[in-house]
Image (tube, helix red, strand yellow):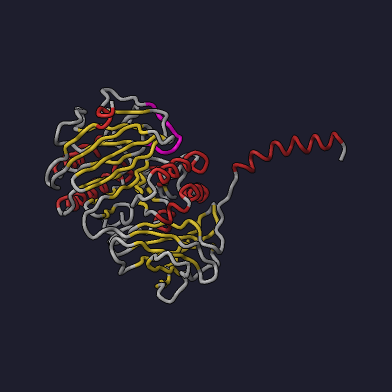
Amino acid sequence: MTFKKKSFFLAALALVLPTLAKAQEFKAGKFPDRIILTWSADPKTTQSVTWRTDSTVNKSFAQVLVEDSSPKLDKPEAKEYEAKTEVLKGAAYETANYHSVTFEGLTPNKLYTYRVGDGTHWSEWFQFKTAPEKEQPFSFIYLGDAQNDIRSKWSRVIRKAFATYGDARFIVHAGDLINRSNNDNEWGEWHFGGGFINGMIPSIPSSGNHEYFRDEKRTLTLDPHWRAQYTLPENGPKGLEESVYYVDYANVRIISLNSQMIVLDSTSLKIQAKWLEEVLKNNPKRWTMITYHHPIYSTAKGRDNKEFRELFKPLFDKYHVDLLMQGHDHTYSRGQNLPTGVSGKVGGPMYVVSVAGPKMYKVDVNPKWMDVFAENTQLFQIINVDGENLTYTAYKATGEVFDSFKLKKTSKDKAAVFTDLNKQKK
């Protein structure tokens, strides 16, 4: 090769390599990937797991047994389940099979180990722990939008959250997990970022606006990946199964609303409000937390979900909801007793907006309803529940504590009492 030709080749390679670096593909194979825990039934006695393979794997299994630290895991007492298989195919991505199993008859508060595969191509063995029968302290992770540059810039946030509190019992995702609906590569990045964490700690995801698209009839449609890759409770309103649901864990009821349908569909707005009131009215748990994507009090300029706020806020107040975990506005904001924003006064739910991914907005609302806010900051939250005490801590991606408060709640029929832990530190 002449010097001139070699120089041309190197110059061309320099142009191509950055493109190749951005074009990582997440194609399915015979070995299971995108392994993720969720709940579809009682967390004390069941555990659901979903995974993906290529389209050649039509029959798949999951094995589970009590963890006893022995390396002899493939033994007769391992219970085997045959998976339900669903085909997912899109115009822009290859056909893949999604497999799901719900382990049943488990013992509360017990550590289990499991694997999934087709009998020849198995995953590694993962662990999970069932929910306790009675109240006991536990913590969980709450993450705002991932959305953009997921593999590159969001991954470190969920991993830092896991490194900070690896014994978290579940992870709440407040919508916009990806940026372009029905984009398999972006879902590949999301699963890549969570990695083995998703296979060990159950997820409680809420759908956001970026999980939706309009089909050829202009019908608002949830990304088909959603129901294929998550096995969630079907205790929501008809037609909104697995995007509107609730999970009871220990002394907490976690409710997920579909705010994209609330803000864009007046019928869904009323249906979800009616369903929510019944779920709140018949709630036996001490703590009530709700997650959804669109904040009812926005932090970004020009955004106002008025109908959502006017119909749902009275329910939040009436039934003493304790914590609202929101996303969408790509900032951090926290406030109570809205719209006055007087934290510390007994009676109001705590509203939080957070962002885990790199897309950022400015806090631009007047008057500012929040007591604490941040811009251009990726965060994760760890919430500890211990009987009548809840401690909330927001961390920067560095692991530095940014915001912290405590709620004390003596019964489900009373509002929680707020303590600002930031002021105590000062």
For the C terminus, which image quadrant? top left
Regarding residue 360, the answer to whether it shows in the image is yes
Residue visible at 49% across and 60% down? 52
Please state if 15 lies on the left or on the right of 410 as rendered: right
Please state if 151 lies on the left or on the right of 111 as rendered: right
Residue 49: % across, % down: 40, 61
Farthest residue toward the bottom? Answer: 76
Residue 306: % across, % down: 25, 34
Regarding residue 182, the answer to whether it shows in the image is no
Seen in the picture, residue 56 relative to 330 is either above or below; the reply is below
Residue visible at 34% across and 51% down? 170
Please state if 37 lies on the left or on the right of 2 as rendered: left
Farthest residue toward the top? Answer: 366
For the record, the magenta segment spans 355-362
Q: Quadrant of residue 81?
A: bottom left
Is 294 in front, or is 322? 322
Residue visible at 44% across and 50% down? 216
Dominant secondary-structure state across the stretch colored magenta = loop
Residue visible at 19% across and 42% down? 316
Seen in the picture, residue 298 relative to 128 is either above or below; the reply is above
Residue 14: % across, % down: 71, 36
Residue 305: % across, % down: 28, 35
For the N terminus, which image quadrant? top right
Is 331 in front, or is 272? 331
Please state if 77 lies on the left or on the right of 282 as rendered: right
Q: Is residue 360 magenta?
A: yes
Q: Quadrant of residue 264?
A: top left
Q: Is residue 129 magenta?
A: no
Q: How many marks?
A: 0
